[in-house]
Amino acid sequence: MTGTGPDVPYTEAVSDMTNEAAVAAEPSAQADEVRPRASSYRPDIDGLRAIAIVTVVVFHAFPSLLPGGFIGVDVFFVISGFLITGLLAGELARSGTVSLSNFYARRIRRLLPLSAIVLLCVLAASALLLSPLAVPGISTNVIAAALYVSNIAFATQATNYMDAQVETSPVLHYWSLSVEEQFYVVWPLLIIVLAAVARRRGWHVNRTRRWLGAGLATIGLSSFALSLALTTSSPTWAFFSLPTRAWELAAGGGLALVASHLPRLSRPVAAVGGWLGLALLVGACLILTPEIPYPGTAAIVPVAGTLLVIAAGGRIGTSGPGRLLGTRGMVSIGLLSYSWYLWHWPVLVFTRAWWADRNPVDLLEGGDAELGAPAPTALILGAVALSLLLAWLTHTLVEDPVRHSERLRRNVRASLLVGLALTLIPAGAALALRSADTEPATSAVRVAGVSMTPAQAVADTPEVGDCQVGIPGTEQPAPCLFGDPNGTRTMVLIGDSHATSWFPGLNEQATKHGWKLYLYAKGSCPVADVSVFNGRLKRAYTECDQWRDAVVKRLGEIGPIDALVIGRSSNHRKNLLDAAGTAIPAEQVSAVWAAGMASFLRRLPVTPARVVVLRDSPWANWNVPYCLSQHTPAPTSCDLDPAVSAGLDADLAAGEKLIPAITFVNVNDRICTKDVCAVMTPDGTIKFRDSHHFTATYARELGPVVWSRMKLPAKPAPATTS
């Protein structure tokens, strides 16, 4: 296949880069490799590949420098569709069918050797450099990458590609290879079926080609319609899945089917079209941002730009934009695009992880523990240079030798067996590492006298079923009743995932004191009537607004409320939006938050006897269980500085204090001392299951303190009879 990725994929090497006419001219239908004549080689396509890989690398290394650099993967999709469709159509014209064995043998020689090497290196580096708790997840992702289903795996995991940082999988970029491989399983089979229909009806070559074009157009239009629908409703699947990306490959394939007509274009028209295409690509890199819903309609820009550049090259060759794209430097980078694509992302991930482990973020300065400490520019430049060096070495020592191996080229069966081995070896190694790592991960830190292991801490989550609604959800299920179902008083715990973080302790206390406890929670969604930006959705979090309306309705169904308890993350202070969708300045956060909270309380169908806001707990500068698993001899290395981690919600609290009805509860003095925020209790309970959510065990330990500080009315005495 051709390599690719939201980073930078690939197709065939230079010698495999042929236009449709060259493929059709291949004398032998059984040829193992397409060997274009000198006149058929398109250096401008390698130059276009160079643009794609550079934009992706820059985007991953310095996102703010080239905010739309992620469009490089779209460029690769179009190139791949153009080249592979041209190859298949040419073989069909020569022989009347397509040899699947030859096709996949070429793909194997081109892609799998280097892919397997990078996957094995990722496994080794993960075991050496990352937390033992991270290794099982990475091993699972490596298995998915080796089997070319990583796009499905990342979509299922709701991975946010645009926000990928320190703790992101080092094989995230393999998703695009999976998309292409899946397409090239479907497309050759469809060509064979369509060709069989054409043969049965006795159609000539041109009519058969139109028949193929109709099939490709159907795929493309259906895919585009689905992409538009899912970009808004299910953006993760829209980004990662083949059905929503196939139209980009189909666009390139459609151009390949009409490539023989490109010489009819006038040279001036072709030149203008080529320069316009380059302008569209440059504009997309500079104007598009990760916040724009993607792919959707925005992907039309890079797809159209790529099509224009390829079409222009088919008419004027190395003239016009082809002269720029065909320079030695551009071609050289283009030839390394697949290997550079595979290496650059894991090198960046491991470099950032190494730096973040030694340089925690400054939360007081607006840092984000979930993204990790930003590595210095010089270090990132060094990582980029190292990835390019690795790309050149493996391209020279692995890619080219295997792809041009005469022994493999002459023996299709041997190529297929090599492909099977190169699939099973990294998948098997990942499975073995995952199995071997399970016990060390669960026993980590026990040597330091800790009763709860890091792995147990990660898994120690509140048991609330679907009562915490996921980010895509808008409806709150009912009833979400806990505590004492027969209780005489009613408490409602409401908020985002931090409300759920307090739940185990409040639930235990509510049961003990005879209170009903309702839980209404939604990930990343504040109770206040405010608009917030959601990084996963890359847009205003409208699902939060709809869920909030649904909760108001639910509250009207449960009768009198004795205590409404609100839990919320301090992170909302960074995500507030105004009516126009613009970020709220820091100095306005308190006022906007106060207005939103007052608005929500006014909308309640019943007035709670008491409204309690739980002040946000300290945030760690790192993932606590991961840190502990890496510092087993000295777990106190993971403790927090209270001056850095406390009071992060001060601006939110300042706004809430403007509302007289609200009572505040702050138990941070029980979580931290004035000198340190220990991440473990003296009895060995790990307090956090990540950087900012309590373990359920620790939440229960805090429960009595929280309950007493809420100063709730005592359980009413049983009624007496006269």
Image (cartoon, helix red, strand yellow):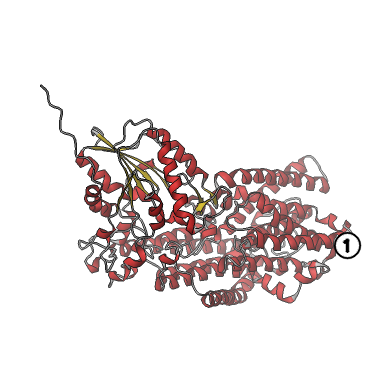
**Res. 440 in view:** yes
> Residue at left 23%, top 53%?
701
Question: Number of callouts in the render?
Answer: 1
Left or right position of 287 against 525: right
User: Where in the figure is residue 471, as x and y percent of width and height?
Assistant: 47, 47
**Res. 470 in view:** no
> Residue at left 72%, top 52%?
251
Residue closest to the eye, 388 or 481: 481
Which image quadrant for residue 621? Answer: bottom left
Quarter of the figure that contains the N terminus: bottom right
User: Few, some or many C-alpha atoms within 10 Å of disc 1 (few <14, some 14-19, many ≥20)?
Assistant: some
Residue closest to the eye, 490 or 639: 490
Q: Using the image, determine if residue 303 lies above or below residue 433.
A: above
Q: Using the image, determine if residue 686 lies above or below residue 326.
A: above
Left or right position of 8 against 692: right
Q: Using the image, determine if residue 458 lies above or below residue 544.
A: below
User: Where in the figure is residue 462, as x and y percent of width and height?
Assistant: 32, 48
User: Where in the figure is residue 306, as x and y percent of width and height?
Assistant: 73, 59
User: Where in the figure is residue 129, as x and y percent of width and height?
Assistant: 41, 71
> Residue at left 80%, top 71%?
323
Residue closest to the eye, 669 or 235: 669
Left or right position of 261 against 639: right
Secondary element at image label 1: helix
Amino acid at circle 1: Arg
The residue singled out by tag 1 in the image is 267
Quarter of the figure that contains the C terminus: top left
